[in-house]
Amino acid sequence: MGRVVVEVMPKPEILDPQGKAVVGALPRLGFTQFTGARQGKRFELEVDGEVTPEVLQAAREAAETLLSNPIIEDVVRVADASEESAGVSA
């Protein structure tokens, strides 16, 4: 079973009240090194079999038509989740 990760973010010119709330709360919790935050969405789409270029293209089309609102959001990433986990270190 394969998995595709899709990340959607608000367009830069769109106000992000959730991101503003996060950046406002960070210093109160002692995290003073962060000066900005934007909040987006992450989807994980499971597929039978391998994640092929055709599967990634279908996921991108789904992201652009269903998973995001193209007026206010950008699809910023569509990737094979197995490649993502291979690059993460603890």
Image: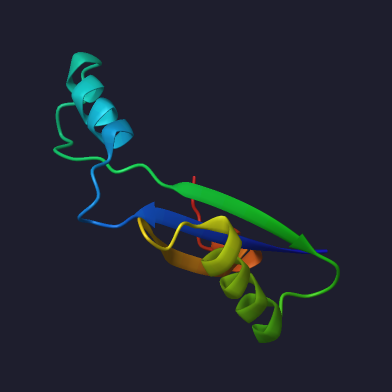
For the point 50% across and 55% down, the residue is 88
Q: Residue furthest top?
A: 28
Visual colour scheme: rainbow
Count of marks overlaid on the render: 0
**In the image, 62: left or right of 12?**
right
Q: Which quadrant is the N terminus positioned in? A: bottom right
- Residue situated furthest front in the rendering: 71
Give how far across and how far down residue 78 sits, in percent. 53, 68
Residue 18 lies, in percent from the top left, at 32, 32
| Residue toward you, 79 or 74 | 74
**Quadrant position of residue 52:** bottom right
Image coordinates of residue 53 in percent, x first then y, are: 65, 85
Please, is residue 5 above or below residue 31 in the view? below
Q: Nearer the viewer, residue 79 or 83?
A: 79
Q: Is residue 15 visible?
A: yes
55 is higher (above) or lower (below) than 11: below
Q: Is residue 89 shown left or right of residue 37?
A: right
Question: Image point 69% across, 85% down: which residue?
Answer: 54
* Residue 28 in picture, x, y percent from top left: 20, 14
**47 lies left or right of 7:** right
Question: What residue lies at 84% left-to-right and 72% top-to-bottom?
Answer: 49
Front in this rendered view, residue 90 or 45: 45
* Residue 65 location, quadrant: bottom right
Whether residue 86 is visible: no
33 lies above or below 46: above
**71 sits to left or right of 57:** left
Q: Say which quarter of the image contains residue 34.
A: top left
